[in-house]
Structures are given as structure tokens and as C-alpha cells.
Image (spheres, rainbow, N blue to C red):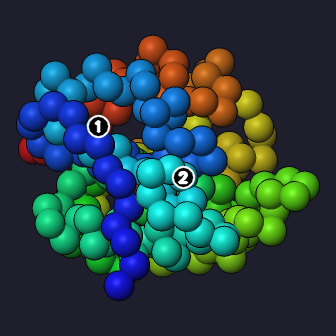
Amino acid sequence: MPASVAVRVLGEGPSVVLVHGAVGPGPTWKAQEALAERWRLTLVTRRGFRPSPAVDRQDFAADARDLEKLLHREPAHCVGFGYGALGLAVAAAEASELFRSLTLIEPPLFVSAPAADGPDAAQVRPATEAEPDLASIAAAGVPSLVLSGDHDPALEVACDSVAARLGAQRDCLPGAGHAVQRTPLFNRRLEQFLFGAET
């Protein structure tokens, strides 16, 4: 059986799982550590990022299996950024009962851009191969939020499409750029959504 992915747990309260994208969890979620005052945060380190097991190729399907295994311990609010959002979307389509809510930050669905450029491209399964059944997530009634940073018109259109298929709340945080979660507006918007999903 493959080794489990590494996680770091902070705080107490309702469970929130955070899944990073192309950069590890520390830099990705630094600004969210303050949320540990009210939430129990589980920062997942995806395969291919230390100290989780090494892989020859990053794969959103493998990420989804890891996340389902983790969530079987306790369903949670789940937040994914970039490539990490793909794994969450695939997992939510396969096991929606494990998700108290789903937040996708700039998920690279319906975008023709590669997940990586140059020599790194062969080490990342292309996001264009991901086809999570968003309609099944919507039908299951999983509260969903799609966020973006208003820096790429094509990505904004893609996020609009993802949100429409999920029946999700949709917000664009102007001036945030790709690192949406680093803007001061992000934590406030995320908590507003999470508190709403808790009721």
C-alpha cells in the first residue's frame, strides 16, 4: 500500500482541509494560518512535495484518492488552489458525502494552458485530462465557492463555467493576481462562506 501523504494540523474547531497547487503548503497557506483561531486546519502536502512520498509524475487522480482516504476519517470543508483544486474536484465527484463544502481557487478546468512549462511539463499530468463530474457535485448539494484573482481573462471565463456547473457561489477578488489566498479579502470571504455552509 502506498505511503500516506503528510499533513500538518493547526487549531481547533470545524475541520477545514487545505490543498496546495504547484507550490508547497507552507508558502501557499501562510496567510490562512490565522484561521486556526476558529477552525481546525489540515494542510495537506501533495505527493511529489516533501515530506510526502516522491512521484515520477503529479496526478490529480492520485491526489483525489489520497484526499478521499483522508476525508474518510472525518468529512470536512475542503479548499483547493490551482492543481490542488483538480484533485478535490475529482474526489468530490466520486465521494461527495465526505465534503461539508468545496472551495476551488482558480481551478485549471476548461483551460487549454498546460499545468507546467518546459522540462516540468512531463512531470505533471495535464489538467485538460481532468473531467470531474461537476453536475454530480451540484446534485449532491455540496455548498461550493469558486474564487479567482482577476489577472487572466480566459481563467475568469473558465472559473465562471466551473461555478455555473457546480451551482456555486462565484467571486473575483480584484488585484489579487494568481495568489488569491494572499489578499486580505480572501480570509474574510472564505470564512463568510464556511460559516454559511456550517448552518
Q: Quadrant of residue 101?
A: bottom left
Q: Which residue is mark 2?
A: 49
Name the image quarter holding residue 4: bottom left
- Farthest residue to the top: give it: 184
Relative image position of residue 135 (x, y in whole percent): 44, 74
Q: Which residue is mark 1?
A: 193
Is 26 in front, or is 159? 26
Q: Measure the C-alpha gap from mark 2 to mark 1.
A: 29 Å
Task: Name the residue located 71 percent from the left edge and 65 percent from the top edge.
Answer: 124
The quadrant in which residue 12 appears is top left
Q: Nearer the viewer, residue 36 or 166?
A: 36
Label 2 crowd bin: few (<14), some (14–19), many (20+), radius 10 Å = some
Apparent side of residue 22 relative to residue 3 in the rendered image (left or right): right
Whether label 2 touches label 1, CB < 8 Å: no
Residue at 87% over, 58% down? 119
Q: Is residue 196 visible?
A: no
Q: In the rendered view, tell whether residue 33 sits above or below residue 98.
A: above
The percent coordinates of residue 144 (x first, y second) are 36, 53
> Please, what secondary structure does the residue beneath circle 1 have?
helix
Q: Which mark is residue 144?
A: none
Which amino acid, by three-letter code, is at mark 2?
Phe
